[in-house]
Image (tube, grey):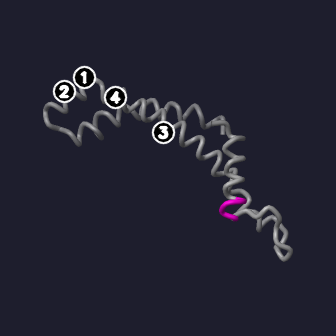
Amino acid sequence: MPAFLLGTLLIIYFSFDLNWFPVSPPQDAPRGRHHRPPLVRAPLVTLCAITVASFSRYMRSSMMDALAEDYVRTARRRGQHRRVLYGHALRNALIPMITLLGLSLPAS
């Protein structure tokens, strides 16, 4: 989902449905830089939601690939169910995620 579309939907939802961000500020609202943090929440939630969604989809596919490997099936047959998930599959699924995180840090 593009960021501008999610941002627009969040503005509509937060402003009109929840009334968290009123369309016009109250008359007695103090003006200044320190009273603006509530206005930063919507863009922050928008950008974080898109990033978390892409990372979670990538992690899911990486974990599914790791769970289909031969060494994971062999370890499951030996009866090491909890160790298989955290010791074998998650460790090998995190390698592409760390690479993706390293490549995305300069972009932010």
Q: Specify few, some or many for label 4: CA neighbours under 10 Å numbering under 14, 14-19, or 20 or more.
A: many
Q: Which residue is mark 1?
A: 70
Q: Is 63 above or below relative to 47?
A: above
Residue indicated by mark 4: 66
Which residue occupies the foreground of this view, 20 or 103?
20
Image position, residue 51 (x, y; %)? 58, 41
C-alpha gap between disc 2 and disc 1: 6 Å
Side of 86 where 43 appears, left or right: right
Q: Secondary structure at mark 4?
A: helix
Q: Where residue 74 is drawn, which disc sits there?
A: 2
**Magenta part mainly helix, strand or loop?**
helix
Q: Is residue 18 magenta?
A: yes
Drawn side of residue 94 relative to residue 21, left or right: left
Amino acid type at image mark 2: Thr
Tell me, yes or no, whether the two marked residues, 3 and 2, touch with CB atoms within 8 Å: no
**Location of the N terminus (image quadrant):** top right
Q: Is residue 32 left or right of residue 41?
A: right
Q: Which residues are magenta?
A: 15-19
On the image, the x and y values in percent for residue 79 come to: 14, 37
- The quarter of the picture where the C terminus appears is top right
CB under 8 Å between discs 2 and 1 = yes
Three-letter code, disc 4: Ala
**Looking at the image, is mark 3 or mark 2 earlier in the sequence?**
3
Query: Considering depth in this image, is 90 or 67 the residue closer to the camera?
Result: 67
SS at badge 2: helix
Residue 70 falls in image quadrant: top left
* Tag 3: amino acid: Ser
CA distance separating discs 1 and 3: 24 Å
Looking at the image, tell me whether mark 3 or mark 4 is earlier in sequence order.
3
How many angstroms separate mark 3 from mark 2 (CA)? Answer: 27 Å
